[in-house]
Structure formats: C-alpha cells, structure tokens
Amino acid sequence: MSEKVVKKGNEAICEAAIRAGCRFFSGYPITPQTTATEYLSWRMPEAGGVFVQAESEVSAINMVAGSAMAGTRAMTATSGPGLSLMTETLSVMAGTRLPAVIVNIQRAGAGIGAITGNQSDFYMVTKTLGHGGLTGLVYGPESIQESIDIMYESWDLAEKYRTPVIIMTDGVMGQMMEQVEMPDYKEAPDLSDQPYVAGKRKDGRKKHLIMDSPYFGPMPTQNDNLEYNYAEYEKVYESWEENEVRYEEYMMEDAEYLIVAWGTSARVAKTAIRHLREQGIKVGLFRPITLVPFPKKQLQAIDKNKIKGILTVEMSVPSQFHNEVVHYIDKDIKVEKYRRGGGNMVLDEEIEECVKKML
Amino acid sequence: MENTYLLAGFGGQGVQTLGQLLTYAATDAEKYATYLPAYGGEMRGGTSNCTVKISDEPIGSPAARSYNYVVVMNLPSYNAFKGKVKEGGTLFVNSDLITDAQADEGVKLVEVPLMEMAKEAGSPVVTNVVMFGLLCAYAGDIDLDVAKGTMLQKMAHKEKFIPVNTKAFELGVAKGQEAK
C-alpha cells in the first residue's frame, strides 16, 4: 500500500531512492542539498545500506562509481559547485556505462553563486557529462511527487540502458513541503552477471575483467575500439529519442498561446495559466520532463497556424533552456522569454504580465 | 479558492514551525497545501520567513508576490513585509514588539499581543501556536477540530506540553473569531 505523507522535497526523493532499492549513498553537504544528506545519514543505515559522508564531492562520486561496479544501486546528491567537482568521474561513468543516480538540487549561478533555487545547470548537464561528449538520461521533474516517481524507476532505466541517470530538482523543490504518495519497497535485482560488475559470476567462475571498458571490443586497436563503442553508445542515445522522451501537454487543446517551461518554472506557469484562462486568454503549457532526450519532435510539431506566440519561462540568466527551445520551434512563431536569475524565483504574476504583452 | 500566507519573525519565534503546522493541518483537512521556507546565510536573531498556500485544487506556484494573510512577529519583518498584503487581505502584527503599526489602504490590521497571550497560556515559547489557532479561526481554511488534532500530534510529544499548547491554541482561536 502506498502512503500519503507531507514531506520536504529533499527527504521525499531520498526516501523514494531507499524504496527503489538504493543501498549506497555518498555525498558532501552543500546548500540546498544538505537536508538530503542529513536524511540519508540515518535512513540509509536503517534500511540496511551504507552511508558515507565523503571529504569532497570528488570522492563521493568515485565511491558511487565503485559501488555501482559492485552491483549495488548507488546514488549521490549535490548542487552546482559539487557537480562541477564530480564531472571527471561522471565522464568516466558515461564512458564505462555505469548505472547510478545523481540528483542535482540546483542553486544559482557560477562559482559560489547563490544558495537559493535556480535552473542554471541546464546546459552543463544536458550537453555532455564532463569531457568526452557522452551523456546520460536527464530528468527535470516539476513537483515533489514527480521527483519521487522518477527516482523510483531511475535504476530500472539506468540498468536497462547502462547509463548514469541525472535528476534535476532545485532549491525550491528541495526545501518546500507538500503532500506526496510514497511507493512500496521494491527489491534491487541481482546484477552480479552484468559485465560492469566486478567479482564472482553466478556460476562461481572468477571474472577476468574487473571493469568493463570501451577500450575492449572487436577492433584491433584501442582507438578503433573507442570509436566503435562510442558509435554503439550513440545508437543507444538515438533509441532514447524514440522510446524515452517524456513531456506534458497542459491545457494545450484549444491554446492560442503557449508557455514552454520545465521543473519548478513549469509548476509556477500552471498557476499563471489558470489565472489567464479565467480572464478568457487561451494559453497552455508544453513541459519537457526528459531534458535528455529532449522532446525535439514535439516542439518541431507546434503548429504556426494554431499558436500565435510562445513564452519560455526559466530560472536562469543568461538564458539556456530558451535557446534550446527556440532551436526547434517553427521560425514563423514568435518566441519571447521570461526568466529570473541569481536565485530569484519566477512568479506567476510576472508570467501573466509577459503573456498579456504578447497578445 | 487559494489562500496565501506569509509568516515572518525572528529566528526562534517559530514561524517555520507555524508554516509547517498549517501545511500539515490543511493536508489533514483534505486540502492541498505547500510550504516554502526562505533560507539563506542568516544570523541568530535575524529574520526568518516562509510562504504557505492552502487550496481546494492542486497548487502550482508555491511562492507569491503578495499575500492574503501576512503575519509579522517582529519589527524588521513588519518593515519588510507590511506592503506585501493583497487588497482585501489582513496584516497581523505582534503588538508586543511592534507599536503604532499601520496597514496599507484596503488592508485590515489585526494587532495581537502575542507574547502576552503566550504567557497567559503558560509559556512564552508558544507564540506560534497562538498564531496557529488565530489563523485557523480567522481564515477558515482548516476545520478547527482537525487543526487542534494536528497541532497536538506534532507539538505535544510529551504529555506535559499538552495543556499549554491546548490553551495557546484556544486563546488564538478566540482572538481570531473576535477579529473576523
């Protein structure tokens, strides 16, 4: 039986991880992620797993990679500056195709920036994981409930495609509280036969490789194997475009104007849409849920004969998501932007004003 | 129907707990509710605030530019937030710390001697429970029996705290009904 509770975003997503079978967490406290680490410091041992507070994010992500190589469902959580420190190993994980889950509870800006919520790591996470041009599945939930639901199936997807999964929440979603429904506990599968898992095989024979690597393959040289394997990875990424794209269409049926937004910005936009609809303005929302794969075809399909204008909403200055959206929208549709940066929230009143300016 | 609350005071006055109580109680009363704390590099004695929304429908934005109900429990909060009340809304001030309070035109002012009332209930630390009872009675978002049940479940882990919290809640309710 699922249960309804009022929970803080950071705690809820961590509880969902426990229920999804995660039994290893290593992380380093950083605002606004700290309550996630705090929660798992007692909850993970209680669930029979291992919690390690690392000395830095570099060691945290390396422990997560090691734990994944031991066949454990492993995760970490961090915020922008910590994610920057993790990028080298994220690149390794994408390269060796290690399944693990990384939660990025975004804060504002570059460097130390500001500690309140923002969506300014969009490019950093969606373009490539660290150096090398490889990627993983990236999700941008809009609510605590959706972050729970995505977390609950994230290892199933990570293991299916052998990929890191990144869940992008933010300081707003992490710190706020609302009612959610928690899923039942599920067992993690036995991963010992997976090529990336070190140790004994199920039949008792010793494995010769302690890790899988793109250096190995059918080609005569290391370079050729890298090229060959990365081309194979590319086929996996392309399959995501067909099979894993997720998005929401909210009040779009009769819409004449459209807001395009993800995550917290999208939920704020929904309030603005309800108010605008009360005033007779036909506006809807297109919301990407997967940031990788990005819903390109759906954006390309937006009909210029139906939609008079589009407003993108994001919490990032300079714009990131906006530029990505514009790339796919029919050039005959006018696309405006409304964004707030520096850790300031987008507000539904300001979205309303921006939409009215487009009429 | 969606009501927005801004609760502000100095760290230690319990405004975050007050916001969480409203959220728990509204949920227990089968409503939708969100709680959003303001956080940052703060100092002891500095200001603390949070936003609560209570609605009959799922809530989009957990934040607002202006509010139906603004509670200010100290002077810096009054100065920062007195202008954030929607027209037709109410500004609640802790009159023990804020004297000569004034509200904008179209905004109702309710002066509450919060610390005096908390002392009357039996403890100076229950100002937030007084305010909780007051807001429930005044705004009418949450059934009072449900609210009391939630408060006792969350606030009275030890039996000795039950009478003082109950008294604080009831004093708040009486004041809220009187001010309506």
Image (spheres, rainbow, N blue to C red):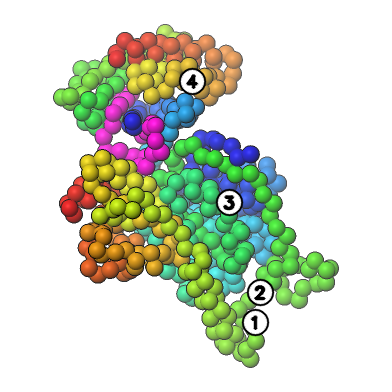
Residue matched to label 2: A212
On the same chain: label 3 and label 4? no
The kind of residue tagged 2 is: Asp
Left or right: where does residue A44 sit relative to residue B3?
right
Asked whether residue A58 is drawn in magenta, I would say no
Q: Is residue B3 visible to the viewer in this orientation of the structure?
A: yes
Marks 3/4: CA–CA distance: 32 Å
Determine contact: label 1, label 2, CB under 8 Å.
yes
Q: Earlier in the sequence, mark 2 or mark 3?
A: 3
Please rate how many residues cluster around mark 4, counting C-alpha atoms within 10 Å: few if below 14, some from 14 to 19, many from 20.
Answer: some
The kind of residue tagged 1 is: Phe
On the same chain: label 3 and label 1? yes
The kind of residue tagged 4 is: Val
Asked whether residue B70 is drawn in magenta, I would say yes
Question: Under tag 3, what secondary structure?
Answer: helix
**In the image, which is nearer the foreground, mark 2 or mark 4?**
4
On the same chain: label 1 and label 2? yes
Marks 1/2: CA–CA distance: 8 Å
Residue matched to label 4: B146
Residue matched to label 1: A216
Residue matched to label 3: A152
- The numbered dot on residue A284 is none
Percent coordinates x, y for residue B109 in the rendering: 24, 19
The kind of residue tagged 3 is: Tyr
Marks 2/3: CA–CA distance: 26 Å
Q: Residue at x 64, y 83 (%)?
A: A217
Percent coordinates x, y for residue B60 in the rendering: 37, 42
Over which residues does the magenta segment extend?
Answer: B47-73
Question: Under tag 2, what secondary structure?
Answer: loop
Residue at mark 1: chain? A
Marks 2/4: CA–CA distance: 57 Å
Residue at mark 4: chain? B
